[in-house]
Image (cartoon, rainbow, N blue to C red):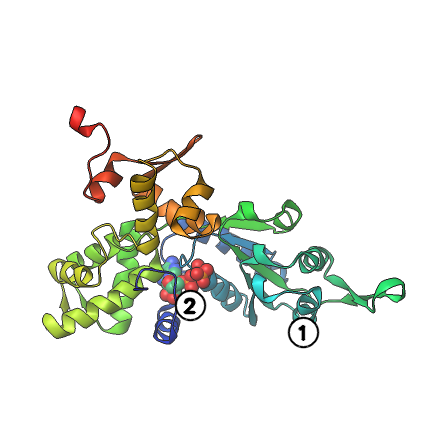
């Protein structure tokens, strides 16, 4: 079941496209990021120049791609989308950069996962709008300087700390995107319901918002599943109880934990007695990369009060034991 995972399919992409806010005004929540970004863009427009490079950090599905599209739209500039892992050679990056139009916005998702030589080429491109393309190999190799159009790079990363300092420092503006509050997700859901023609009642929206892991993408995805259920079983009206019953069927629990969240908690509690245990040990136990556990599962588990990060490692809180229907060690002795 990939309902609450980061997975994307055709239906998903089409739905996301339809629901994407097109302007900063339509973008819900993340007030601080929106205000700051608004200023950066207004200043750039006032100067008649492309905006400074922008780094967006935050977990999957929080709206980084959406913001990049909004920046391009607000700057009335074309947008090019690529990603760090797609750039395996410096030459790949040179090809992308040299084909940009003046003022174009280049969105590089997972910018922390670019090949090293490409990364170094990017430093110069960001700073001087120039690259050296190396032609040939060995002693005969020559570097041909190539001027680039002025562009705005929008780098996205799950965590700004993953970026090497020289790259991080070349962004004029860094925005940290946090998990959304349930009240903000209620607004996201109300907007989506309106666009999709779903009869979503206030308590229905609240129920879905509370189970969406603080993530708009998940909120929208759950809304579509809840709609299916409501159409078949509740004349299309999504009330709180209808949403709860639907999500029960799709195995989304009351806190909205997904498979990875549950795996992490279960390992922490059942294999490590509730911790403390180191991140990498925990990651091996659930068969995931440490980075995934850290940036995808943990922020929400911490926010939900189920997991704590301590200097000695991760520990499960009493609420985590309770959520798994278990008694914390020592509970019977109290
Ligand atoms: P990833 O890095 O995993 O691609 P992302 O951070 O780029 O994720 P987006 O693709 O921008 O996330 O957002 C996912 C979906 O969530 C979008 O289709 C959009 O409909 C919705 N969304 C995201 N942020 C907001 C917001 N602030 N207001 C309304 N809808 C939003």
Residue 240: image x %, image y %? Answer: 14, 58
What quarter of the picture does the N terminus occupy? Answer: bottom left
Residue 111, quarter of the rendered image = bottom right
Vertical comparison of 161 with 68: above or below? above
Residue 303: image x %, image y %? Answer: 33, 42
Name the mark nearer the viewer: 2 or 1: 1
Vertical comparison of 310 with 231: above or below? above
What quarter of the picture does the C terminus occupy? Answer: top left
Task: Decide if ligand 1 comes within 8 Å of the CB at mark 2.
Answer: no
In three-dimensional space, the C-alpha distance between marks 2 and 1, rounded to whole angstroms, equals 25 Å
Q: Please give left or right for residue 302 compared with residue 142 in the image.
A: left
Which is nearer the N-term, disc 2 or disc 1? 2
Q: Are marks 2 and 1 in contact (CB under 8 Å)?
A: no
Residue 302: image x %, image y %? Answer: 35, 41
Q: Which residue is drawn at 20% across and 70% down?
A: 227
Query: For mark 1, what is the residue?
Result: 99
């Amino acid at each position: 079941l990939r309902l609450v995972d980061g997975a994307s399919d055709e239906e998903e992409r089409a739905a996301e496209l339809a629901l994407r806010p097109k302007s900063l005004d339509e973008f819900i929540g993340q007030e601080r990021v929106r205000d700051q970004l608004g200023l950066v863009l207004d200043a750039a427009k006032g100067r008649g120049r492309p905006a400074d490079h922008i780094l967006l950090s935050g977990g999957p599905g929080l709206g980084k791609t959406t913001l990049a599209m909004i920046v391009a739209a607000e700057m009335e500039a074309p947008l090019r989308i690529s990603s760090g892992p797609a750039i395996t050679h410096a030459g790949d990056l040179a090809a992308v950069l040299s084909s940009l139009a003046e003022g174009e916005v280049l969105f590089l998702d997972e910018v922390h996962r670019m090949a090293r030589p490409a990364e170094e080429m990017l430093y110069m491109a960001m700073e001087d709008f120039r690259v050296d393309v190396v032609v040939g190999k060995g002693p005969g190799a020559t570097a041909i300087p190539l001027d680039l159009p002025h562009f705005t790079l929008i780098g996205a990363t799950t965590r700004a700390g993953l970026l090497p300092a020289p790259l991080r420092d070349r962004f004029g503006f860094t925005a940290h995107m946090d998990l959304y509050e349930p009240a903000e997700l209620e607004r996201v859901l109300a907007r989506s319901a309106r666009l999709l023609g779903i009869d979503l009642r206030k308590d229905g929206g609240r129920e879905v918002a509370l189970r969406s892991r603080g993530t708009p993408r998940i909120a929208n995805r759950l809304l579509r599943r809840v709609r299916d259920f409501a159409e078949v079983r509740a004349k299309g009206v999504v009330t709180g109880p209808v949403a709860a019953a639907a999500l029960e069927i799709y195995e989304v629990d009351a806190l909205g934990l997904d498979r990875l969240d549950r795996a992490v908690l279960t390992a922490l509690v059942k294999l490590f007695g509730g911790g403390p245990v180191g991140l990498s040990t925990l990651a091996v136990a659930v068969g995931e990369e440490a980075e995934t556990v850290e940036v995808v599962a943990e922020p929400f588990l911490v926010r939900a009060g189920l997991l704590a990060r301590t200097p000695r490692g991760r520990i499960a809180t009493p609420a985590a034991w309770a959520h798994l229907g278990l008694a914390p060690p020592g509970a019977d002795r109290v």
